[in-house]
Image (tube, helix red, strand yellow):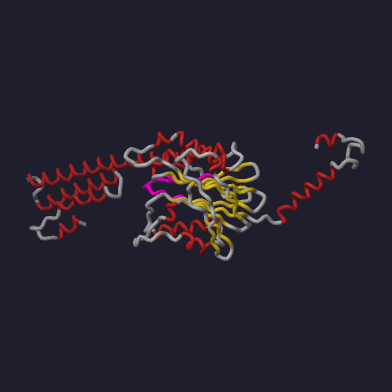
Amino acid sequence: MITVLDILAPEDIQLGPLLVIAPALTASFAGPVLTGAIGVLAVAAQAFIVERLGVLDTRNAFVQITALAVLTVLVVFFCLIRERRGRQLAQVRSVAEAAQHVLLWPLPERIGPLRVASLYLAAEDEALIGGDLYAATRVEGGTRMLIGDVRGKGLAAVGEAAVLLGAFREASHQQTGLPELAAALERSVSRYQDDFETEGEAGEPFVTALLLEIPDEGRVGRMTSCGHPPPLLLGPGHSVAVPDLHPAPPLGVGGLAPTCHSVDVVAFEDGDTLLLYTDGVIEARDRDGAFYPFAERASRWTECAPDVLLHHLRHDLLAHAGGRLGDDAAVIAIRRQPVTAAAHQPVAAAAHQLVKSVRPGTARPGGSRHGPGRADRRA
């Protein structure tokens, strides 16, 4: 276009020097090959313009063509450096994402009789996790869950979060009750506190945590809070309740014994949803400084499935905060699925048949009334 305009313009107007725009603009969206090709075309166009003017053998024309060629070489070199750094960044980012996924395992959609969904919003750019954490594990007769918040935010708190997650996954299968589990986590946090002290940060590190145990049988949930906000209990008809908990101090502030941690029992019926969250959710502010009305907004979607509920909450929370949170935020939605009678029929029928086949005094194929036959022994 510049070449055509230069041909159409009067002889006293020269637009050839504007050809430097071509390789410079190409470098902003293309790689070194296309940028070099455009640069070569620009140099050829400049030579054509000065030759048409009859000044190709002048010193001024030589300087213009040489300057454009040198600029093209520099821009292509810049593109090569940029692509190399881009590949390195992509590799580092993929390794970081893999490491973060290993640390914060994604929760399964179903855990026993529960449907589960999780949401994590990290305050640090390009980070998938930060100082907030959650985990779930199956134990005998039920499910145990943890949600916590390390003092501080972003990647600086990831180390302490990793210690707590590892301790929870191991101690959940060794401790019989939630108070004993909380005491075990307290010992783990206290043991490694010195390793995660941040220079220039006042105060000792600590972790708020909420431990939840949901038995497979019964319609209750047991909780032990270590300075963590209580969950929301969503029920039919857009009802929202806040369980009355008796929290102990956060982990890492005193080395508390199991007797210092209480267990609070709440009703958790079929169709109810428990929302566990960190303070990054309720402390998110809008432009006017107003906190996010979490309970009010959650009441709109009490009838939704856990994943749909968190989808709505994510968009609503980010819209309230202007697209970016000032602190890490995590939410877990847990719904107890009602068990229908039809689901029990195949199991009940099989159990009845098995009991009937081994009832004492009943004739069996391949045996007698007084003892099992070979078929029974194989069974």
User: Magenta span has 174?
Assistant: no
Near-viewer residue (152 or 330): 152
Q: Is residue 100 visible?
A: yes
Give the left or right position of residue 290, taking residue 138 as reference: left
x, y percentage for residue 48?
A: 16, 50
Residue 50: x %, y % from top left: 12, 50
The front one of 185 and 333 is 185
Quarter of the image that includes the C terminus: top right
Q: Residue at x 51, y 63 (%)?
A: 299
Is residue 130 magenta-colored?
yes
Residue visible at 27% across and 49% down in the picture:
28
Residue 94 visible in the displayed image: no
Residue 211 percent across, percent down from the top left: 54, 46
Q: Quick check: 308 left or right of 131?
A: right
Relative to 32, does residue 282 appear above or below in the rendering?
below
Q: Position of residue 318 (x, y in %)?
A: 41, 57
Q: Is residue 301 above or below residue 129?
A: below
Q: Residue at x 26, y 50 (%)?
A: 26
Q: Is residue 363 left or right of residue 343?
A: right
Magenta segment main secondary structure: loop
Q: Name the residue: 57% across, 43% down.
A: 178
Q: Residue placed farthest to the bottom in the image? A: 237
The segment highlighted magenta reads 120-135
Q: Residue furthest front?
A: 259
Residue projecting furthest to the right: 369
